[in-house]
Image (cartoon, rainbow, N blue to C red):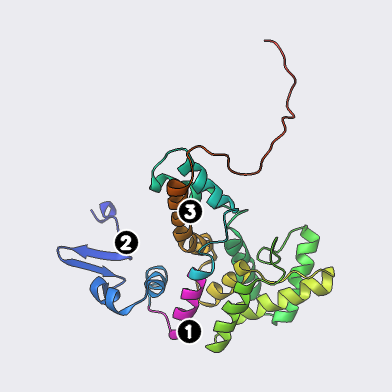
Amino acid sequence: MSDNIWKTAITDIGPGKIRIKGYDIADIMENLSYAEAVYLILKGELPSKAEAALMNAILVSSVDHGASPPSVLGTRTVASGGNSLNAAIAGGVLVIGDSHGGAIEQSAKIMQEWVKKGESPEKAAAGLVDWLKETKKRMPGFGHRLHKTDPRTAKLFEIAARHGYSGKHIELCKAIEKALEEKTGKALPINVDGAIAAVISDMGFDWRLGKGFFIISRVPGLLAHAYEEMTRERPMRKLGPMPFEYDGPPDREI
């Protein structure tokens, strides 16, 4: 009989009752910020003051990054086709993957694996960079196509330092930045994805939640872009890189 019962450890509901991880929703509404509530539902416990501040910074940091990211183009394209608001936002979320929005997950996975080796940050970073070179891999979360210094990274680490919150993953992250420059001769500063990866790892979050943090942060921005597309632009307009050039087969007969 028990095999037929679907069990969940997230939310307990009943007539007049909603308790998330054991806490009454009315108490959460009055006493927790949105960022703290997200931390609670993902981690299962209330955040410390430092973790609450960092969680808030994480969710704000990636709320939007202009009209050019693939997820925004996806949202605006779906909206331009005359679809509903939810379809437009869903379209943008579906564009998020390993190449766009996936660096938090990928970077956190690598850092969590290398911290487990128990080496000093400097030794682990040096070994990691050598491994990247040998396997011809790129370290996700470092370097940026636009920013030479990502202002969001600096602020996130500043908040962490202010609260005395710097664990093994943040230390490794900073050591990787130095090792990359020393061993490659190129400056590859930590971008916001790498910084978030380090912080959520020190918070004890599984790396598999990495894309989730990006999605939670980015959806309000996608909503704003969808609404702007629906209210300011004409339907079915040209979006994305233009013009294009055909390079397929020449005209031919069946």
List x then y, in percent, for residue 146: 69, 62
The furthest residue to the top: 254
Element marked by disc 3: helix
- Above or below residue 11? Residue 225 is above
Give the CA distance from mark 1 to mark 3.
32 Å
Q: Which residues are magenta?
A: 46-59
Q: Residue at x 72, y 17 (%)?
A: 251
Per the image, is 24 magenta? no
List x then y, in percent, for residue 11: 29, 65
Viewer-nearest of labels 1 and 3?
3
Viewer-nearest of labels 3 and 2?
3
Mark 1 and mark 3 lie on one chain; the one further toward the N terminus is 1
Residue marked by disc 3? 225
List x then y, in percent, for residue 103: 61, 61
Give the CA distance from mark 3 to mark 2.
35 Å
Give the CA distance from mark 1 to mark 2.
29 Å
Residue marked by disc 1? 50
Element marked by disc 1: helix
Residue marked by disc 2? 8
> Is any atom of residue 90 visible in this view?
no
Disc 1 and disc 2 in contact, CB within 8 angstroms = no
> Is any atom of residue 27 visible in this view?
yes
Viewer-nearest of labels 1 and 2?
1
Task: Compare residues 116 and 142 and report the one nearer the observer.
Answer: 142
Q: Which mark is residue 16?
A: none
Quadrant location of the C terminus? Answer: top right
Count of marks, rendered view: 3
- On the rendered structure, is 243 left or right of 223? right
What amino acid type is highlighted by mark number 1? Ala
What amino acid type is highlighted by mark number 2? Thr
List x then y, in percent, for residue 68: 60, 53
Q: Residues within 10 Å of mark 3 (few under 14, many from 20)?
A: many
